Image (cartoon, helix red, strand yellow):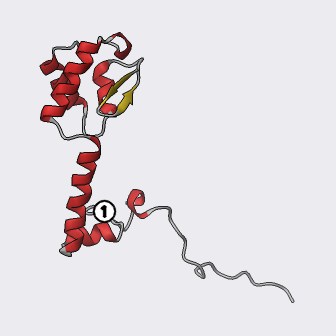
């Protein structure tokens, strides 16, 4: 099992896929990292040598912001927007989409499960 940037990446996957398990590295970044580290992208993680893992880790450390540091930066940016009461910050505070999507329908990922407002159903007449 290889550990890169504090994350244990899956041993059975190809290295270009396994690198995407690290927060802040996507498919394109993964390919770029492997090119600079001179590692074959289709190589399985379990077959990597310690030298190859070290080269990959060195490229990530020098050129990329990943994991905890990146999450701190992103949350700091959102906090700044909230503090200055920017429109996007208010949308983040209200748990609503912040980039202009419609909310009359959809937006369930941000707004959560639908809650039906009570008292709208017609009452059934009962015999007395």
* Image quadrant where residue 123 sits: bottom right
| 32 is higher (above) or lower (below) than 93 | above
Q: Which residue is mark 1?
A: 97
Question: Whole-percent x and y of residue 23?
Answer: 30, 39
- Inspect this view and state whether residue 49 appears: yes
| 31 is higher (above) or lower (below) than 79 | above
Residue at x 50% of width, y 65% of height: 114
- Inspect this view and state whether residue 106 appears: no
Question: Whole-percent x and y of residue 124?
Answer: 73, 81
60 with respect to 103 (left or right): left
Question: Whole-percent x and y of residue 111?
Answer: 41, 64
Residue furthest to the bottom in view is 128
Residue furthest to the right in view is 128
Classify mark 1: residues with Cα within 10 Å, few (<14), some (14-19) or many (20+): some
* Image quadrant where residue 30 sits: top left
| 35 is higher (above) or lower (below) than 66 | above
Residue at x 24% of width, y 62% of height: 78
| 53 is higher (above) or lower (below) than 126 | above
Question: Whole-percent x and y of residue 64?
Answer: 16, 36
Between 102 and 9, the residue placed more toward the observer is 9
The quadrant of the rendering that contains the N terminus is top left
The quadrant of the rendering that contains the C terminus is bottom right
Residue at x 21% of width, y 53% of height: 73
Identify the element where label 1 is drawn.
loop
How many numbered marks does the figure carry? 1
Between 3 and 23, the residue placed more toward the observer is 3
């Amino acid at each position: 099992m290889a550990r890169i940037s504090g994350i244990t990446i899956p041993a059975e996957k190809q290295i270009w896929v396994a690198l995407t398990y690290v927060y802040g590295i996507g498919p394109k970044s993964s390919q770029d990292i492997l090119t600079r580290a001179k590692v074959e992208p289709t190589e399985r993680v379990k077959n990597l040598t310690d030298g190859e893992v070290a080269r990959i880790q060195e490229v990530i450390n020098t050129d990329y912001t990943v994991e905890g540091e990146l999450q701190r930066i992103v949350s700091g940016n959102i906090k700044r927007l909230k503090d200055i009461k920017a429109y996007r910050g208010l949308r983040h505070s209200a748990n609503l989409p912040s980039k202009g999507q419609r909310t009359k329908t959809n937006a369930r990922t941000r707004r959560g499960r639908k809650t039906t407002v009570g008292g709208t159903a017609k009452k059934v007449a009962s015999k007395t």
